[in-house]
Each structure stands twice: as structure tokens, then as C-alpha cells.
Image (cartoon, coloured by chain):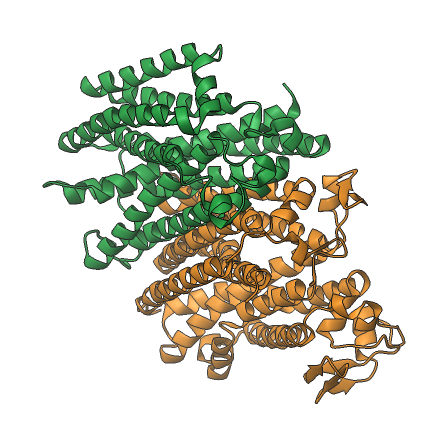
Chain colours: A orange, B green
Amino acid sequence: MSDLLAARSQMAVSLAFHIVFAMVGIAMPVLMVVAERRWQVTGQDVYLELARRWAKGTAILFAVGAVSGTVLSFELGLLWPEFMRFAGPIIGMPFSLEGFAFFTEAIFLGVYLYGWERISRRAHLAAGVLVAVSGGLSGIFVVIANAWMNTPTGFELVAGRAVNVDPLAAMANPAALPQAVHMALAAYAATGLGVAGIHAFLLLKDPSNAFHRRALVIALLVGGPAAVLQPVAGDFAARHVARHQPTKLAAAEALFETTAPAPLVLGGWPDVAARRTRGAIEIPYGLSLLAFHDPRAEVKGLDVVPRDEWPNVPIVHFAFQLMVALGTYMALVALWAGWRGWRGKDLAHDRRLMRALALATPMGFIATEAGWVVTEVGRQPWVIYGVLKTADAVTPMPGLIVPFLTFTLLYCFLGAIVSWLLYRQIIRSPRVTE
Amino acid sequence: MSLAELVAGIIVVALNAYALLGGADFGGGVWDLLARGPRRERQRHLIAEAIGPVWEANHVWLILAIVLLFTCFPPAFARLGTLLHIPLSLVLIGIVLRGSAFTFWRYGGGAGGGHGSETERHWGVVFAIASLITPLLLGTTVGSIASGALGEGGRGKGEGFFQVYVGPWLTPFALSVGVFALIAFAFLAAVYLTLEAQERELQEDFRRRALGAGVALFFAALAALLLSQRWAPRVREALIFAPWAVPLHLLTAATAVTALAALWRRRWRVARVAAATQVSLILWGWALAQYPYVLPPDLPVEAAAAPAVTLRLVLAALALGALVLLPSLYYLLRIFKSRQPSEVP
């Protein structure tokens, strides 16, 4: 394994690990605040129990998210010192703002978790709301920094150096809005449907347990709308990628030649040497329609850049297909649950719906990981698209396989413990009859 | 004062806050590991109570310092990340283990909570050991910076893996600063815990520990000073001959004596203020001694600084952030640090 590949792998493992906890840290506070508010309005103790248990889960996941986020902020320098030397002054701004949002989140999470008996009910709920708001903001700021790597703005490149730096223009880079919306919805959809799925699974055995029934409704109310909106946001993001990062879209769609009109390629295995995709289903005009909302539009293929500037096409294509498939399933299940709920049906006794929801539990997280593979691997060989190559940003330190393996083991160990702790929390859920 | 100096000063403020708050949490881990005697479990319980609500918030000061460093002094950040890859990676592993072990230890017991079970003790040990390693290596990092070993255009101490990536920090002086940081954090924690404890016996336990750590701190400082002669001559020179040096040392000595005397006479609040001032003065002494360099001997603040527009925007963001942050922090500390500890949630 080369040092560059080891550094990329360590960054990939660190990000993949952190993203799960970051998403839960963004969306879980919304669930616990809604449950607490329901308790304050209805006076039903089952809601208080729910809020407290969700808060406990949030505490565990937030702690792991905080430390893994710290690791990432250091790793920017430990693995990519040349990237930070170039990019620090340009995109440090969203990181600074993220720092404050995260600070606010940490403070009010402390108030929320430990303050049940110490502050008024109203103040306690307000602390929860602040956790939810600042969690969402901190996620958005970090995604803005990433978006800049995809569509860098706010500087001029003169002899390899950035001059006329404008950090605000960098924050307002074209990819910022589509990426931030897509990621925020992903956090609420994945966490909401993830929690709903767990409770749906438990309701299959015990459909009249009020604890799970209440939990299911709240989780669906948070996750469902996000899951339904996500394909729209995804379309927005994809059309944007088609314009600003044509090679990424070409890799995602395994489109080797620039084509007009371009078909949508479903499945298949991209044969990079032969420049064609084997065993795929092609829908005529599909890609032109999706990417430009025009059936005759020309879509740029990988042939617009030299071969050594292609990303890994099979990985990006597969990850993209996986993300779209899972996202579609989640949107459909959310619509189904919404329809049944709107018609006034008892969701918990609909066994087919409960099974479909239980199946969706991990999907949002897998889809998000796949989406990040698309955007990160799809940008290669660039770390800053069109400006700085990943190979030129890596640290000169040799032997990077050692930290890569060390952090991978550490995260496997932590992941196993967190799963076990959450499993113990979940199987201890109470029996509450209506 | 230039913009760059202002930001550099704010980074030192963030590090100072991290030392006083996050440092004390590390120190709590040390006393957890060293818990002895008939009140062992009560000592551990008190430490967990004191740390719990402020844990995450205290930790963010370090992130703030790092973010400011890479935004405003990117060449310094790149050099630190490259040459101190090994100790900083170990610090990260310590931070990960410490943060997660603490939370697992607290919440791992399921619905009932309750300290003292086997599993929880395992977490306690991980937490405590991580609490030893992390401050030791953070201090070593500071020692390495102060000794000027990260200079020569960022090539470390010459050619070869050991010279570049190990030599700059594996020196007696850098390690002595690591030991000093560890003892300073333990000292702070013990002093704070005398105030947190509601029972007289526990107060006495931590009073003895604070006095012991305070005396040990003096010897650790002496050792670092002696070693600096050979390993960090520039910083040593500034610490002895700069115009501010003598007043600073007199003030530090006065706070150290005040802290110990206050502990002796059981004036806990006075001891807390004096101990925190003492540690802060030492930190600022380091910062002043290496001024005007971010990384001595060849990377000055001005040369390492980002473009002025970035600095101005960051300062504006800091001002805005402080408007949100300071009242929030005050609120947090007022709720949890001015009254009786409550039940574990």
C-alpha cells in the first residue's frame, strides 16, 4: 500500500466513521425535543421516558461524534499539510463558524442531559431546541467547506499560490447550497427512519406497546418528510454536478463518451479499459432528462478530461446506484407510511408496513456513506477540483500504513462497543400498555 | 498590535481555557487512577460528577485553537502536522479513548446507572490511562515547539526518519514539559475537587493530593528549567533576561505560594483562583518567551499569517461567536458549578 493510498484510506475511514455519529448528533436532538414537548403538552409519562432514553442515546453518540470530529480536524494537518497550507485561509471561515456552533451544541447538550432537575421545564426544552439548531448549523458549515473542494471559488491562482483571497466568496461557492440541503435532509431521513425502523421491528412482536407506538410516530414525523424530499434535493444536486463537475457525473453514470441525447445507465459493470459498461439497462434520453431537464441535452462524458484525471469509475458508479436505490426505497416507504397515517389507519398493526420500515433501518446511513463515496472518490485525482491534486497534498511522512491500521482498529473497537451499548439500551425498552 | 498578533493572542487564550478546564478533566482522570483508601469509590464518584456536565464543552477549546491555527497560520499548522505526526496521533488516540470511555463508563450501566461494577471499572481504567498519556504528549508537543526543534524550514533536525519525525519531540526537555503539564493538570483537578466535594473527608483527601501535586509541580518546573539550558536555550534566555521575565516569575511564585497557603488553611475558593492564575501565568510565560515566533526559531507570527482579509473575518466571527458563547458558558457553569451535585442521569 502506497503512503498516498494509506493516507486516503485513513481519511476515508475517519470520515465514514464520523459521519454516522455526526448525522445522529444533528437529527436525534430533534426527536428528543419533540418527545419532551409532547410530554409537556399531554402529560403522558411515556413521552418523558422516550425523551430521556433518546437523550441517553444522543449522549453516547454525540461523545463519539465529538472525539472523531476532533481527530478529523487534526488529520487535515497530519495527512494533508499541503492542502491546509493552501486552503486554510480560504475555507477556515466555515470551520471557525462550525467551531462556535459545535461549542453551543456541546454546552446546551450538557445543560439538557444534566439539567432535568435543575432548571425550569421551559428552559430545559429551550436547551434541547438550541442543541438541535446548533447541531444542524455545524453540519451545514462543514459541508460548505467540503463543497468548496468541489467547486473552489474566492481566490485567484497565480503561479500555484492563492491570491486575492475572499473567504466569503469561498463560502458562497456554487456547490454549497445543493450539498448542504442534500446532507441536512440525509441526516434527518437516515436518523428518523433508522429510529422508526428499530421501533417498527419491536412493534412486530408487540404491536400494542405504547412506548414503541409513540416513538414510531415521532421518528416518522422527523424522518418521513426528509426522505420524501430527498429525491428532489438529489435531483437538484445532480443537475448541479452535471454543470460544475462533469467528470464526477460521468463517472457516477459510467458515461465514457460525451453523448446527446444521453441514456440513463442502470446497473452494469463499467469496463474502463474498453470504455463501455457491460450488462447495464439503458433508458433512452434518461440522463439528459435528469441532468438538464431536456431530453436532447448533451451530457459530457469522461472523454472531456485526459485518462489520468479520471476517478475510479466502477466505485463511483456502484456507489451512486446504491445511493439512488436506497434513497428511492426510503422515499417510497415514507410515502406509504404517510398515506396510511393520513387515512387514519393504525400503523403499528400493519405488519407489511412495519416489515418494510424495519428493513429500512440501516438504509439511510448506507446511502449517505455511498453518497460521500460518490462526491469524494468522484473528485479524484483532485483534492481541490481542478486546482490541487491529492497526491500533491499528502504529507511527506513515510509509513502511513501504521496510523491507518491503528485508527481503523480503534474505530472498529469503538463501533463494536457503541453497537453493543445501543443494543442493550434498546432491548431494555419498557412495556407500556395504552 | 497587528491583526496576526491579536489572533495569535486569542489562540493562547483558547489554549489557556483548555488547560484550566479540559486540563482539569485530564487531572480528574489521574486522581481516578490513583484513587486510594476507604473512600476510593466516593472519590471516583465525585470526579465523575464534577466532569460530566462540562466534559464536552471543555473539550471544544482545543478544537477552537486548532481551527484558528489552520485558518490563520496555515504554514505553522502544516509544519506541526508533519513533524509532530507521531505524538499528535497518539494524543488523538488518547482523546478518543478518554472521551468515549468516559461516556461509556457513565452511560454503559444501562437504565440503572450505578458505579462500581466490573465493566464500569474497565472503562474507568481506559479513561484514566488515556488521561495520563494525553497531557504528557500534549505537554511534550509544547516543549518541542518551545525548544525550536521545528525550525529549519520545517525539516526537523536533519535527514532520516528519526531525525525528522522523532528527534524534535523525543528530547529530555520536551518530555519534562510533558511531565510538568501532567502534574499541573492533576494539581488543578485536585484544587477544584476540594470545592466540589460536599463531605469534609473527601475535601481532606483532595487537599492532601493538591498539596502534594503543588510541591511536585515546583520540582517539575525546576527540572524543565535545568534541561532548557541545553535543549531550549532561546526560550530559557527570554524567560530569564526579558524585561517582563522577573515580574512574571515573582507573580507566578506569589500565586503558587498563595495557592499552597490557601490549601493549607482550607480556603478553597482562594486556592482555586490562585492555582488557575498560576497555571495561566506559566502558559503565558511560554507564549511570551517564544514571541514573535509561532514556531521558533524561523517562523514568525507575521510571516505565517493568512491574508489580512481572512484575519479580519475570523476576528469578526470570533466577536460574534463570543456574544453567543460567553453567556452560554456562564449559564452552564452557573447551573452546574455553583450548587450541590445532583443524581447521575
Q: Is residue A338 left or right of residue A433?
A: right
Towards the viewer: B41 or B340? B41
The residue under the point 53% across, 38% down is B64
Quarter of the figure with residue A303: bottom right
Closer to the camera, A188 or B216? B216
Residue B243 appears in the figure: yes
The image shows residue B338, relative to residue B162, as above or below, that is: above
Side (left or right) of B257 relative to A55: left
- Residue at 59 percent across and 48 percent down: it is A137
Residue A304 location, quadrant: bottom right
Residue B138 position, x and y percent, is 41, 39
Q: Name the spot of residue A326 as percent of width and height, x first.
A: 60, 75
Of residue A205 and residue B125, the one placed in the foreground of this image is B125
Task: Determine the residue located farthest toward the bottom in the rendered image.
Answer: A279
Could you say which is closer to the camera, residue A39 or residue A98? A98
Please indicate, yes or no, whether residue B84 appears anywhere in the rendered image. Answer: no
Q: Residue at x 61, y 50 (%)?
A: A142
The image quadrant of residue B340 is: top left
> Residue furthest toward the left?
B38
The mark tally for this picture is 0
Residue A71: x percent and y percent?
Answer: 49, 50
* Residue A285 in picture, x, y percent from top left: 83, 80
Q: Is residue B38 above or below residue B216?
A: below
Which quarter of the rendered picture does the N terminus of chain A lie within? bottom right
Q: Is A149 situated left or right of A419 in this image?
A: right
Q: Quadrant of the C terminus of chain A?
A: bottom left
